[in-house]
Structure formats: structure tokens, C-alpha cells
Image (spheres, grey):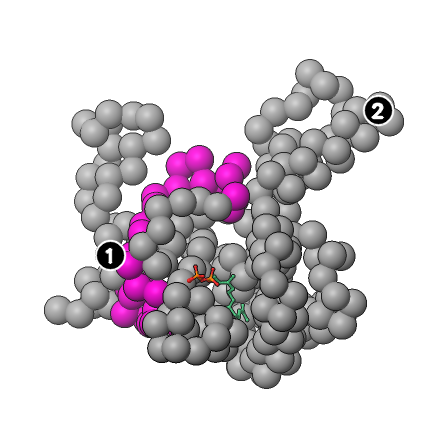
Amino acid sequence: MSFEEKIDKARLPRHVAIIMDGNGRWALKQGKNRTFGHQNGVEAVRQTSEAAAELGIKYLTLYAFSTENWNRPKYEIDALMKLLVKTIDQETPTLNKNKISLSAIGNLKSLPEESYNRLMKAIEDTSGNDRMTLNLALSYSARWEITEAMKQISKEVKEGKTDPENIDQDLICKHLSTRNMPDPELLIRTSGEYRISNYLLWQIAYTELYFTKVLWPDFRKEDLYKAIVDYQCRERRFGKISEQLNKC
Ligand code: FPP
């Protein structure tokens, strides 16, 4: 039985988040520069998005560029931005064909103007699609996101629009960039690193974490299926005890 056949379609995670890691190491192993790794990572993005949509996953969030990635060498940042724009342009028709809408979270205004404009256009051009949302975390970090939410809430308190007594988890969620989506049930990190790297820190409070040694450019549909089967074998207790759960 393949991993795909083992998946219980009735218990799919609605939202899967991925830390795509290992592009640089994948390239260096072949004596190529890091950019080559990012270029080959695009096929993994394509395959993963297609597999997720085919399965019926509603939200897929990919960590494409972190706030900390701005500290990389300029040539790598430039190459990543170019690749991003090129990929978005090339893939928009496929996204439409597959009824996938594109969205993005992060400090998008810090992207180069050209990248920002093309990203916004692709988001607009795919906005009518409702099969799955492909959400790119770009110039994103969770601490940045939480800080922005705090600033916004403080402003609303100052203007008298929010009573501090009414600040609760729900209100904080409504001020995060993921306000329109459920929290991820599954977070995958590739490349054998066991870190969260400032990704969706608020949203992953109860998320199942899955780490694989596969480097991102080698990640294929089968690897996503494997992660979902692993997730479905886990017991999610949310603070309860085993006997209180409806067992499958
Ligand atoms: C991490 O690998 C990967 C990134 C920082 C960029 C991910 C970008 C892509 C896959 C390209 C295109 C993406 C989209 C959404 C169109 P790393 O460079 O940190 O690898 P290393 O840990 O081996 O150095």
C-alpha cells in the first residue's frame, strides 16, 4: 500500500505549514552555488502544492523568505527575489487551472518594488479560486508579526476602540496575518534541522511537528503523503487524557 493510499481523506489537516530547508546544502553537495538549490526548490514547491490541492488540503503555507534571510549575501537575496517573481509569473496560469489562490504574509512592503507589485498582481489574478490557498511567508518572522499585532491593538486601545479588558486570544488572532485561516495542524521541516526558526510561533501552539532529513529540492508528493500518514497516526489530546478522545 502506498503512502497516498494510507491517507484517511476524512481526517486531513486543513492547514499544512512547511519550512522549506536545505536548498543550499543540496546545491553544495553537487558542487554548485546556493542559487542552483533555490532554482531546484521550485519543482518541490510545484509538486507539494499540486499534491496538497489534489488531496483536499485547504491551506498550504510555505516559508519562502524570512526576516533573517535579508542578512544573506546580496547575490543570493537578488537571485531569490528574481526567482520568486519569475516563478509567480510562470505559475499563475497553473494556479488558476487548479483553482488555487495565492496569498502572502510578512512585511511585504519591504520586498523590492517590482517583486511586491508582481506578487500583488498574482494574488489579485488568483483571488477567485477556492480549492486551496497557497500562502507564501515572505520577509516574514513570527516575532515581527506578533509585534505588529501588539502595535495595532495598542493603537486601538489608545483611540478608545478596544477596552484592554477585552483583549483575549481571539482578538490577538484577529490581528495576526493569518487571521483568515485556521491554525496549521501539521508543520513540516525538511533537511534534518530541528528548529522552528521564528515561524508561526503563535499559530503552532497545538500543531504536530514533522521533521524529515529530505532536502527541500528532493521533496516530492510521496514525502508529503508520508508526513500526513505520520500525522494521522498521532493522538492529538489538546490537554485531555487519552480515554476522553474519540478514537478512530
Ligand atoms: C532554505 O534553504 C530555503 C530558502 C531560504 C528559500 C526557499 C525558496 C525556494 C524554494 C524558491 C522558490 C519559492 C517559491 C515559493 C516560488 P537554505 O538556503 O537555508 O538551505 P541550507 O540550510 O542548506 O543552506
**28 on left or right of 122:** left
Q: Residue at x 44, y 44 (%)?
A: 196
Residue 225 placement (x, y as % from top left) = 28, 64
Question: What is the C-alpha distance between the residues marked 2 and 1?
Answer: 48 Å
Q: Residue at x 20, y 39 (%)?
A: 247
Which residue matches tag 1?
A: 229
Q: Residue furthest left?
A: 1
Which residue matches tag 2?
A: 158
Between residue 154 and residue 98, name the one nearer to us.
154
**213 on left or right of 15:** left
Residue 33 placement (x, y as % from top left) = 48, 75
Q: Is residue 148 above or below residue 106?
A: above
Q: Residues within 10 Å of mark 1 (few under 14, many from 20)?
A: some
Tell me the element at label 2: helix
Q: Amino acid at mark 2?
A: Lys
Which range of residues does the magenta coloring cover?
Answer: 198-225
Q: Residue at x 71, y 70 (%)?
A: 115
Q: Is mark 2 within 8 Å of ligand 1?
A: no
Residue 185 placement (x, y as % from top left) = 40, 46
**239 on left or right of 15:** left
